[in-house]
Structures are given as C-alpha cells and as structure tokens.
Image: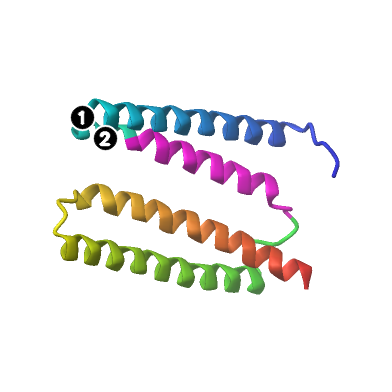
Amino acid sequence: MEFRTDKYFLVNLSLIIVGLALATSGIINIFRNISDGNPESLLRAIFPVLIGLGVSMSSFFRILNSGTGVVGDERTRKVAKIAGLYAFLILLGLLVASASIAGALQLDINFSLAVIVISYIGIFSWGILTFYFNRKGDLE
C-alpha cells in the first residue's frame, strides 16, 4: 500500500481526525452528565457524538472508495438498492425491538432521542453495507 499525499486524501484524513475528536469530546461530556446525575443535558451532549461519527465515517468511506466505478452503472445501483433494503430492515428491527423492550419493562424513554440515534444507525449501516457489497463484487 502506497502512502498518498494528494490534497483530497489529506483533507479527508483531517476530517476523520476532527470528527473523532468531536465524537470523543461528546462522549466525555456524556459520561460527565451521567456522573453528575444531569440527564436533561444528555440530549445536547449526544449531538456532537453523532455529528463527529458522521463526518468521520463519510470521510473514511471517501478515502477507501477507489473511484473506479461509474455512479450510474447497473451494478452500483443494484448494490445501493440491496444495501438500502438491508439498512431499512436493520432500522425497522431496532425500532420494533426498542419499543417492545420499553413497553415490556415499562421504561420511561425519550423516543425523540431514540429515533435520532436509530436513524443514524440506519444511515451508517447503509453506508457500511454499500461499501461491503461494492468491495465484495470487486473481489469476485
């Protein structure tokens, strides 16, 4: 593997570092809020984590993308459709499981926050599955 030093690579690498730093600071704030017993500010502390992870993962996938595939070709569209289906099923399963567990255990959960977190999980799973199915097709 060769070490690339073009601007595109360096910008994406710096975005990964900034995103991980933002996510780490958000996680530290979450642990501080939990230890202080202040659950109201937990909602404000989770957004830096989600934004930082989003920036890091999108930059990571841009670095790993070989750039050889055409965006509108048949294989890429098929991969995106299959990954979208699996990501939707993951999202639906998480929503049903969280609502069922909250109902069975009679937990007082703020579902506005849960929907945001589960939506991010769905978006990340779509990106990871698209990358996986795209790479899997390249190896065959």
Instruction: Give the residue furthest to the right.
Output: 2
Q: Position of residue 81 (x, y in %)?
A: 52, 72
Residue in the image at 18% along x and 66% along y: 104
Q: Position of residue 120 (x, y in %)?
A: 40, 51
Of 17 and 30, the residue lying toward us: 30
Q: Are marks 1 and 2 in contact (CB under 8 Å)?
A: yes
Classify the position of the N terminus by image quarter. Answer: top right
Local crowd size for mark 1, using a 10 Å CA cut-off: few (<14), some (14–19), many (≥20): few
Residue in the image at 34% along x and 37% along y: 46
Main SS type for the magenta part? helix
Mark 1 or 2, closer to the camera: 1
- Amino acid type indicated by mark 1: Asn
Left or right for 74, reference 57: right
Q: Which residue is mark 2?
A: 42
The residue segment tinted magenta is: 46-67
Q: Which residue is mark 1?
A: 38
- Amino acid type indicated by mark 2: Leu
Q: Position of residue 25 (x, y in %)?
A: 43, 27
Q: Position of residue 11 (x, y in %)?
A: 65, 31
Of 9 and 48, the residue lying toward us: 48
Is residue 57 on the magenta stretch?
Answer: yes
Residue 63: give its label: none
Task: For marks 1 and 2, give the CA distance.
Answer: 7 Å
Residue in the image at 23% along x and 31% along y: 41
- Quadrant of residue 68 in the image? bottom right
Left or right for 128, reference 87: right
Of 103 and 16, the residue lying toward us: 103
